[in-house]
Image (spheres, helix red, strand yellow):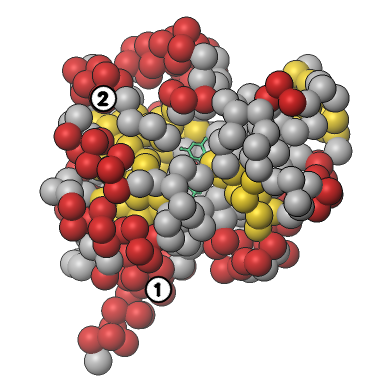
Amino acid sequence: MSEGPPLRTPVCALLGCRYPVVSAGMGGVARAELVVAVVNAGGYGLLGMVRESPELIAKEIAAVRERSDRPFGVNLIPYGTDPALLAEELAACYAARVHSLCFFWEVRPDLIRQAKAAGCKVLYQVGRLRDAIAAEAAGADVVICQGVEAGGHVHGSVSSLVLLPQVASALRIPVLGSGGFATGSGLVAALALGAQGIHCGTAFLATDESFAHDFHKRRVVEAGSEETVQSDVFTINWPARSPVRTLENSITRAYHDRLWGHGPDDFARDVIGHEEQRPIYRFSTDSPLRNMTGDFEVMPAFAGQTCGLIEDVCSAGERLERIIREAETVLARLAA
Ligand SMILES: Cc1cc2nc3c(=O)[nH]c(=O)nc-3n(C[C@H](O)[C@H](O)[C@H](O)COP(=O)(O)O)c2cc1C
């Protein structure tokens, strides 16, 4: 794989990676093992630490550092986290002097300023043009522009094809495309739309190193793009009415005409599984992880429409290499 332009965009220098490909900080799924694999292959990795304890955050950061000296970041979601826990999570990140923090959902200028003052770079994932502008104005270093085809929680309603060029042309800071990107042709398309790289979740979920349960990985490989559904029925752990894209399952089929308008107080706590000792409830946002037992079919299998582009589970290094090789082939074909 070459290191030459145009795949080596300025955001690579900012993040300290070889390739402009970032693995998303997927809650539960993106732990040290995945981040190590991505950064050692030349990408930039984010630990998905939403609502995790400060102890686990410190442990995962240390676990990455034991196996790599490359930079990486930590993803947190202020909107979905109790403020006292969020303060502890941030303190753990600052104490460990993490290279970057990646925030998602509504823009919190106070947190951007705080993270910058603590010496962290700030990546902000947004789903709306006005939020992208607000994140830049508040001092973010990179905006991740999330299209509606993205997997997991989805903040906006516009596709990457339409939103990304608007965000890229409105901002001076680097923009990464998120949602719809899992291949080399997707990376080239993102560059054509004005992005400096891509941020991928589903593509890195379906890898050997992700902490998702094999059940979830297999479902992503088997699913076609039309098998994802947006709803807010998976709501326990999150504020009411937070849209999330998952693969269809018996719950989304049962709620096919009632997919919207739900909140965590609408459902009884019905235990469907366990993460070690912690109970997992039906209608919660907990996706099936390696360390869980229970009825995986009714848990939310977060996935973007990119699931239709994922044909196997491979190592994260292999996934990244395929993206870069294909992007180089596409660029050579376009130049010919
Ligand atoms: C399993 C899964 C978990 C996710 N968890 C988070 C999270 O904790 N924090 C976050 O900012 N985004 C999260 N996302 C959304 C990603 O940041 C990103 O927007 C999305 O993966 C992009 O679409 P793609 O999956 O098609 O690549 C998650 C996505 C998936 C698939």
Q: Residue at x 23, y 56 (%)?
A: 168
Distance from mark 2 CB to nearest ligand 1 atom below 8 Å: no
Q: Is residue 19 visible?
A: no
Amino acid type shown at disc 2:
Pro
Q: Quadrant of residue 109?
A: top left
Q: Is residue 190 left or right of residue 9?
A: right
Q: Residue at x 35, y 80 (%)?
A: 330
What is the spatial separation of the Cα atoms under label 1 and label 2, in whole angstroms?
A: 34 Å
Amino acid type shown at disc 1:
Ser
In this rendered view, identify the residue nearer to me: 183 or 156. 156
Q: Secondary structure at mark 1?
A: helix
Question: Dot 1: within a 10 Å radius of its alpha carbon, few (fewer than 14), some, or many (20 or more) residues?
Answer: some
Location of the N terminus (image quadrant): bottom left
**Residue at the spot of label 1:** 185
User: Residue 314's spot in the image, x, y percent?
Assistant: 60, 59
**Residue at the spot of label 2:** 109
Q: Residue at x 71, y 42 (%)?
A: 300
User: Residue 121's spot in the image, x, y percent?
Assistant: 24, 31
Q: How many marks?
A: 2
Question: Dot 2: within a 10 Å radius of its alpha carbon, few (fewer than 14), some, or many (20 or more) residues?
Answer: some
User: Residue 59's spot in the image, x, y percent?
Assistant: 51, 19
For marks 1 and 2, the one nearer the N-term is: 2
Q: Residue at x 66, y 42 (%)?
A: 260
